[in-house]
Amino acid sequence: MPHNPAWRPMRDADLPVVQALADALHPHHPESPAVFAERLALAPAGCRVLADAAGIGGYAVTHPWTGAGPPPLDALLGALPAAPAAWHVHDIALHPRLRGQGHASTVLQALLAASPWRRATLVAVSGTGPYWAARGFADAPAHPAAALASYGAAARFMVREG
């Protein structure tokens, strides 16, 4: 493993560590192991891990989506949309030891640059709306609203064009 943290493609073998990180970092937004496994299977090009000599300390899970609203929290997709219109940022999460070093912005830029769609979407939780707004995302209505509600009352659906 590299001494300096570096993003690399996520592999099936990484899923237990990704799940453990998700459980530790998002205790109020739990997701089952099947959700991460399915996202990796459906959109491997959108899944990355941040690794260094200490191991995996972060992950990014993104995938094609409709662009109108998010998938519900902890829900299997079954398949990607037949006519996706956006790249959905399901989650970018970093262990506290790796925060504040630009790693989230680096992977976000790389994943969005590789996307064939100009539109990107995400759900901001736990007060992260200002962070995402600083990266070009703006609040938008979510359809269906029930999907957004599954993330909690303070969740914000956000969209970035271009």
Image: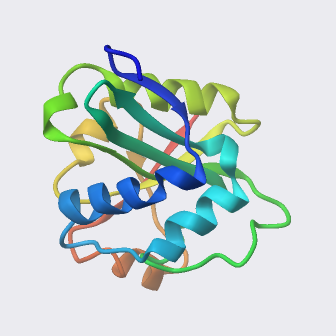
**Relative to residue 62, is residue 107 depicted above or below?**
above
Q: What is the x, y in percent for residue 79?
A: 75, 72
Residue 57: which quarter of the image? top left
Marker count (numbered): 0
List the single residue furthest toward the right: 82
Q: Quadrant of the N terminus?
A: top left
**Relative to residue 36, is residue 94 depicted above or below?**
above
76 vs 74, left or right, is right
- Tell me if I can see residue 23 in this picture: yes
Q: Nearer the viewer, residue 147 or 142?
A: 147
**Relative to residue 149, is residue 63 depicted above or below?**
above
Q: Nearer the viewer, residue 39 or 73?
A: 39
Q: What is the x, y in percent for residue 151?
A: 32, 74
32 vs 13, left or right, is left
- Residue at the (75%, 66%) spot, across then down: 80
Q: Quadrant of the C terminus?
A: top right
- Residue at the (22%, 77%) spot, across then down: 153
Q: What is the x, y in percent for residue 70?
A: 51, 67
138 vs 90, left or right, is left
Q: Nearer the viewer, residue 46 or 149?
A: 46
- Residue at the (41%, 61%) spot, across then down: 16
- Residue at the (22%, 48%) spot, across then down: 128
Q: What is the x, y in percent for residue 141?
A: 46, 65
